[in-house]
Amino acid sequence: MRSFIANTVSDKIHSEFLRQQSTFSPILSSSDSGDNMGLSVDQVRHIVREALSIYDADKTGQVDYALESSGGSILSTRCTEVYFSDTSRVYVFNIPVPFLSSTNSPSVIIKPGMSPGECWAFRGSQGSVVIQLAALIHISSFTMEHIPRSLAIQGRIDSAPKDFSVWSTNAPPFNIVELKVDSNHGHLEYTCLYRFRVHGTFVSK
């Protein structure tokens, strides 16, 4: 976060400085009177607040082309087996009755939300999901998220993905990607995938 905010603020101040380099007024002043061409303290504060708001909007400062609300969608999970828990209970006349309950659907990985349990759980340590992106893009990076150990029950995050790869089913630029998880951090029953994002540059048609 600090790196993103610092770089954003630095770039904006540098751009403003270059725009005003023909003047001899200071780049930073304590006055907001507008009598000089430098940046006032209030202007710098505005730049910092703007950078923070951009980061806080989605925590990366980058467009997520897999995001469901922007047009991304889940096309397939191949042969990945959804994990079902048999520890859930419903009560009938105050008598606990166990039943099989499924986890969230795969689409949870392309939605905002990082609370414990807001994940797609699949059986074992290997799984796959094919994602239709919201647009045709030149891919630059990916972001995979998992809750921190401090928020996990009993401090365990061994169900988090460990080794993974990303594939495409067409030639660049891309509008479809496949995420393949090859291992987790040691959980024997299931793997939890919380959030997966795809970043890049939009390609106009």
Image: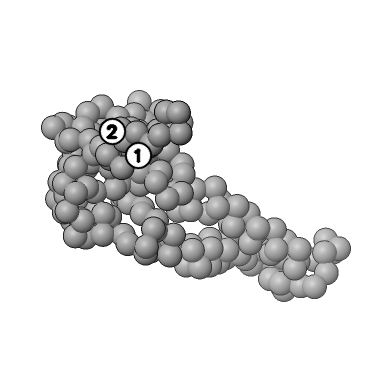
Give x and y (percent) for residue 106. 31, 34
Q: Nearer the viewer, residue 14 or 152?
A: 152
Look at label 1 and name its amino acid: Ser
User: Foreground residue, 171 or 187?
Assistant: 187
Looking at the picture, the colour scheme in use is one colour
Res. 11 in view: no
Numbered circle sitting on residue 88: 1
Badge 1 or badge 2: first in the primary sequence: 1
Mark 2 packing: few (<14 Cα in 10 Å), some, or many (20+)? few
Q: Is residue 64 left or right of residue 56?
A: left
Rendered image quadrant of residue 199 = top left
- 10 Å crowding of disc 1: few (<14), some (14-19), many (20+): few
59 lies above or below 98: below
Name the side, left or right, on which 168 lies relative to 13. Answer: left
**Can you identify the residue that label 2 sits on?**
100
Q: Quadrant of residue 156?
A: bottom left
Q: Quadrant of residue 94?
A: top left
Q: Secondary structure at mark 1?
A: strand
Question: Which residue is at a point 68% across and 71% down the rendered structure image?
Answer: 27
93 is higher (above) or lower (below) than 166: above
Q: Is residue 167 above or below residue 33?
A: above
Residue under the image location 26 percent in, 54 percent down: 159
**Residue at the spot 28% in from the left edge and 33% down from the top edge:** 100
Mark 1 in CB contact with mark 2 (< 8 angstroms): yes
Helix, strand or loop at mark 2: strand
Residue type beneath disc 2: Leu
Residue nearer the viewer, 193 or 35: 193
Q: What percent of the width, then of the height, locates residue 49?
A: 65, 58
- How far separated are the C-alphas under marks 1 and 2? 7 Å
Q: Nearer the viewer, residue 139 or 18?
A: 139
Q: Is residue 28 among what the camera can see?
A: yes
